[in-house]
Image (tube, rainbow, N blue to C red):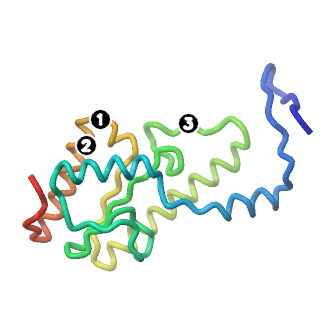
Amino acid sequence: MGLRGSDHLGDWVMADWLTKEQRSRNMASIRSTGNKSTEAQFLKILRAAKIWGWRRRPKLKGNPDFVFNEQRVTVFIDGCFWHGCPRCYKMPRDNRSYWKSKVESNRRRDRRTTKLLRSLGWKVIRVWEHTLKSSVGRESVLASLRSELGKAGRSRAGG
């Protein structure tokens, strides 16, 4: 165990003490309810914009982060790493085949979920995590959200 050298000059990686099956079972058992700091940031944005009527993590297929039931609008805050943001994603150097497969699987699931919810009459807004870090990005997200809420005839959509 311990450190072992790789075939690349100067690279060192920690040896995994779990078997492939144990690691897979371990990773599969980790259930996330989202990135708390990103969701908290989005909550602040909604409150500052006086946008009300949302619910967090309702029991809806695909587990959206925020749902406006009355207007049938869902919001997913996609983490740049886990969802493979084209702008931000940097694949880890170790175990590249695993990470490539994992992120591609997440993106396929995102597309299936979006398609399913739309087929059920929901509007789906997907927001990259990095978009919430700039004022221009936040304003863009708010404009999209207000537009979707407005299409549904929402009078309390803020602004």
**Which quadrant of the structure image shows residue 25?**
bottom right
Q: Which numbered disc covers residue 138? A: 2
First in sequence: mark 3 vs mark 2 = 3
Is disc 2 surrounded by few (<14), some (14 to 19) or many (20+) residues within 10 Å? some
Q: Which residue lies most toward the top here?
A: 10
Q: Amino acid at mark 1?
A: Ser
How far is the residue under mark 1 from the one under mark 2? 6 Å
Q: Secondary structure at mark 1?
A: loop
How far is the residue under mark 3 from the one under mark 1? 20 Å
Image coords of residue 33 (percent x, y) = 50, 61
Q: Tell me whether circle 1 and circle 2 mark residues in contact (CB < 8 Å).
A: yes
> Which residue does the image show at 68% across and 35% down from the upper left?
93
> Which residue does the image show at 15% across and 55% down from the upper left?
50
Which residue position is annotated with label 1?
A: 134
Front residue of this view, candidates 34 and 93 = 34
Front residue of this view, candidates 142 and 108 = 142
Circle 3 or circle 1, nearest the eye: 1
- Residue 146 appears left or right of 81: left
Which residue position is annotated with label 3?
A: 90
Q: Which residue lies most toward the bottom here?
A: 120
First in sequence: mark 3 vs mark 1 = 3
Q: Is residue 9 above or below residue 146?
A: above
Q: Amino acid at mark 3?
A: Lys
Image coords of residue 6 (percent x, y) = 84, 30
Image coords of residue 46 (percent x, y) = 23, 53
Q: Secondary structure at mark 2?
A: helix
Is disc 1 surrounded by few (<14), some (14 to 19) or many (20+) residues within 10 Å? few
How far is the residue under mark 3 from the one under mark 2? 23 Å
- Residue 124 appears left or right of 21: left
Front residue of this view, candidates 122 and 31 = 31
Q: Which residue lies most toward the right here?
A: 1
Image coords of residue 121 (percent x, y) = 27, 77
